[in-house]
Amino acid sequence: MSTRAVARPSSDAVLGTAVVDHYEEALRRHGPSARGMDWKDEASQRLRFAVLCEGCDLRGKSVHEIGAGAGHLVDFLAERGIDAAYSGSDLSEKMVAAARARHPEVAFERRDLLRDPPAERFDVVLASGVFHVKLHHSDAEWWSYVKKMIRAMFALCREVTAFNLMTDQVDFRSETLFYAHPAAVLDFCRHELSRYVTLRLDYPLHEYTVHVHREPNRSGA
């Protein structure tokens, strides 16, 4: 009888698989729409894109989106006239297929950033909504996962990485969502990643957006 240990999936892989199932069910029910990405509506999805993109100058930059879903950021950039070299990745094969169907000219791939980071680096690495849904996982488990993802995103960028999180300054909470204190996230980014951090929470959603720059932000954004 063999005594060789049986390989088990990492805790991060387990977290990711559960979240993939959640979003693929939304895609199945609503198609490649904002609701199919589990957003309330298109307006809130686009507002998040606007805040992410306004925090840095994307013109002429290589931009990689983590958790790209069906590729709606491509539409937003085109509508705004932002000429960026965009690519996207997602944990979900079905999301990648939906994105490729909508934008066959754009590079989308199925990739687990923590287990298989790309060799290529990008000027800007973005993620919108990737950290909102924790499902049945504990806050401690999810915060550990979020920090690993943010570190990996920053390692992937040459200039700036940006992401959004739900604030804990709310009067109602869902057990399946993750709420993070803005000061805790700012402290993590400044101590582990870079001193050049902006945190924006002046828009009408129960969340905030963080930009972590490698150098002082001189874009005027």
Image (tube, rainbow, N blue to C red):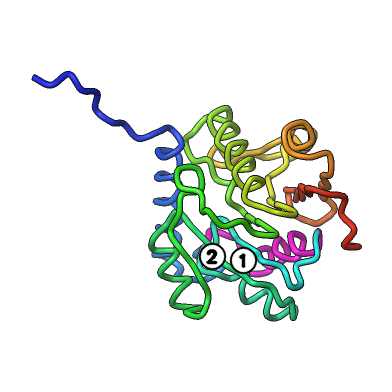
Residue toward you, 207 or 221: 221
What amino acid is found at the position of numbered circle 2 in the picture? Arg
Image location of residue 133, percent across then percent down:
55, 45
For the point 69% across and 74% down, the residue is 77
Span highlighted in magenta in the image: 37-55
Which SS type dominates the magenta stretch? helix
Provide the residue designation for mark 2.
35
Question: Eyeballing the image, is 89 above or below 112?
Answer: below
Residue furthest left as drawn: 1
Question: Eyeballing the image, is 118 above or below 14?
Answer: below
For the point 43% across and 51% down, the residue is 20
Q: Quadrant of the C terminus?
A: bottom right
Q: Is residue 45 magenta?
A: yes
Image location of residue 72, percent across then percent down:
59, 71
Label number found at residue 41:
1
Q: Secondary structure at mark 1?
A: loop
**Residue 196 left/right relative to 43:** right
Other-residue count near label 1 (Cα within 10 Å), few / some / many at <14 / 14–19 / ≥20: few
Residue toward you, 80 or 167: 80
Q: Quadrant of the N terminus?
A: top left
Residue toward you, 185 or 204: 185
Tell me, yes or no, whether the two marked residues, 1 and 2, touch with CB atoms within 8 Å: yes
Mark 1 or 2, nearer chain start: 2
For the point 45% across and 54% down, the residue is 111
Image location of residue 172, percent across then percent down:
67, 40
Residue furthest front as drawn: 119
What amino acid is found at the position of numbered circle 1 in the picture? Asp
